[in-house]
């Protein structure tokens, strides 16, 4: 079994693996990442291979602190304000890549910009420090599947493709980091995520441009319509349950159903709902149902990111 409890010794072994160019799955405060040395083209190629991810999709680089991030990215004043306010934490910044950076081209898929963040998780931090390398780490799932929020999810999706899975229990946020393009003067939201857009706006005292409204690219290439998909078909905004459907509920006012049901948060707490979302979709899939009805979820705070993931889960599959 490749899953090991993330003791100090296990983290040392994982760091050794990473330095040798192997892949290691580790917990962050958002979801589990599939990490590899982002300066090593072979290691990064192995990440794409393990995830069966399209090559054009660039990866997020994880570093231990701002000082380290500055060796790879050109910080704009906006980028610095965001980093100081939200790092370590679940915010990823897209910034221009520095010419001196030793990141391999595959990490950023040949773009002039990179996506970078400082994770706020003791195991991720310990691994970054022990490895002494920037780690490229997409979510540790097969491409197109829901992101793993527990070590067992990683094992189910990737099995023997990852040599070592550091188990740090369920992740706190349960949703990927929010991605902001901070290359210019105005922040552009490329992906909703664990930090609500409103929180960023109130810290900056400035409104965020939604990438969809920005007109000009770059869109986050990861924003494929059908993404984060469970096996079952998903019906959104359900106020009742049709014959044969499983129910993904939210809040206290749940329609009666004889079928499988999971409540994301009986008290209507969006943070709790986000943390439970991906595990709940997996668990409903495992009941063998082929259709999941999802109750309406408010669009405020982290609800915006929850609804984004659910819309992708419900999008027509190619
Ligand atoms: O919470 C997270 O961010 C997790 C954990 C493991 O840290 N990681 C994660 O990474 O979600 P990944 O690789 O699954 O997501 C990468 C996203 C994609 O949407 C990709 O298109 C975008 O980052 N991205 C990466 N580099 C970019 C760039 N230079 N410009 C725009 N978007 C970029
Ligand atoms: Mg992902």
Image (cartoon, rainbow, N blue to C red):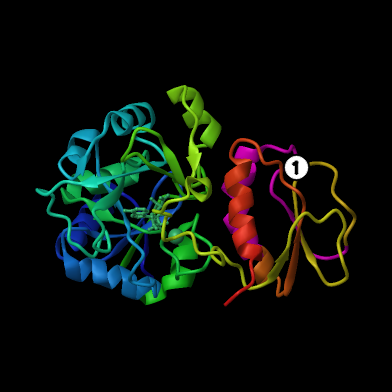
Q: Residue lying at the far front in this picture: please name it.
A: 215
The quadrant holding residue 313 is bottom right
Image-based side of 105 in relation to 273, left or right: left
**x and y percentages locating residue 318 in the rendered image:** 57, 77
* Vertical comparison of 148 with 198: above or below: below
- Residue 107 appears at what percent x and percent y? 25, 61
Q: Is residue 259 left or right of residue 97?
A: right
Residue at the left extreme? 100
Which residue shows up at 58% across the image and 40% down it?
Answer: 302
Front position in the image: 1 or 80: 80
Ligand 2 picture quarter: bottom left
Q: Secondary structure at mark 1?
A: loop
Instruction: Residue 123: name its quadrant.
Output: top left
| 304 or 130, nearer to the observer | 304
Residue 24 horizontal/vertical position (percent): 30, 62
In this view of the protein, which residue sits in the foreground, 281 or 176? Answer: 176
Residue 293, can we see it?
yes
Q: Residues within 10 Å of mark 1 (few under 14, many from 20)?
A: some
Number of numbered discs present?
A: 1
Q: Examine the rendering and report whether any part of residue 22 can be seen.
A: no
Give coordinates of residue 122: x percent, y percent: 34, 40
- The residue at the point 17 percent across, 51 percent down is 133
The segment highlighted magenta reads 258-283
What residue is rendered at 50% in x and 54% in y?
A: 149
The magenta stretch spans residue 165? no
> Which quarter of the figure has residue 104?
bottom left
Query: Pointer 1: what residue?
Result: 266
Assess mark 1: CB under 8 A from ligand 1? no
Q: Quadrant of the N terminus?
A: bottom left
Residue 282 lies in magenta, yes or no? yes
């Amino acid at each position: 079994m490749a899953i090991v409890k993330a003791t100090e010794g296990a983290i040392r072994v994982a760091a050794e693996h990473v330095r040798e160019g192997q892949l290691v799955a580790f917990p962050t405060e958002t979801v589990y990442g599939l990490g590899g040395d982002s300066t090593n083209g072979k290691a990064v190629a192995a990440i794409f291979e393990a995830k069966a991810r399209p090559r054009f999709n660039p990866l997020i680089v994880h570093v231990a602190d701002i000082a380290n991030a500055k060796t790879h990215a050109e910080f704009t004043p906006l980028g610095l304000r965001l980093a100081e306010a939200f790092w370590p934490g679940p915010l990823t910044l897209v910034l221009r890549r520095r010419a001196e950076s030793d990141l391999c081209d595959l990490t950023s898929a040949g773009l002039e910009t990179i996506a970078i963040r400082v994770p706020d998780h003791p195991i991720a931090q310990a691994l970054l420090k022990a490895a002494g390398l920037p780690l490229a780490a997409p979510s540790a799932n097969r491409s197109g599947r829901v992101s793993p929020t527990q070590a067992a999810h990683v094992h189910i999706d990737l099995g023997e493709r990852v040599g070592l899975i550091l188990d740090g229990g369920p992740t706190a946020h349960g949703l990927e980091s929010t991605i902001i393009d901070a290359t210019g003067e105005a922040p552009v939201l490329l992906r909703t995520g664990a930090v609500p857009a409103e929180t960023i706006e109130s810290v900056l005292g400035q409104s965020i441009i939604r990438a969809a409204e920005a007109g000009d690219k770059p869109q986050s290439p990861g924003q494929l319509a059908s993404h984060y998909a469970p096996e079952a078909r998903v019906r959104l905004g359900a106020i009742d349950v049709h014959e044969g459907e499983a129910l993904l509920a939210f809040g206290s006012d749940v329609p009666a159903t004889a079928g499988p049901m999971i409540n994301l948060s009986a008290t209507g707490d969006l943070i709790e709902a986000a943390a439970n979302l991906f595990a709940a979709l997996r668990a409903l899939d495992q009941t063998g149902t082929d259709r999941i009805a999802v109750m309406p979820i408010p669009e405020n705070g982290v609800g915006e990111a929850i609804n984004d993931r659910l819309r992708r889960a419900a999008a027509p599959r190619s």
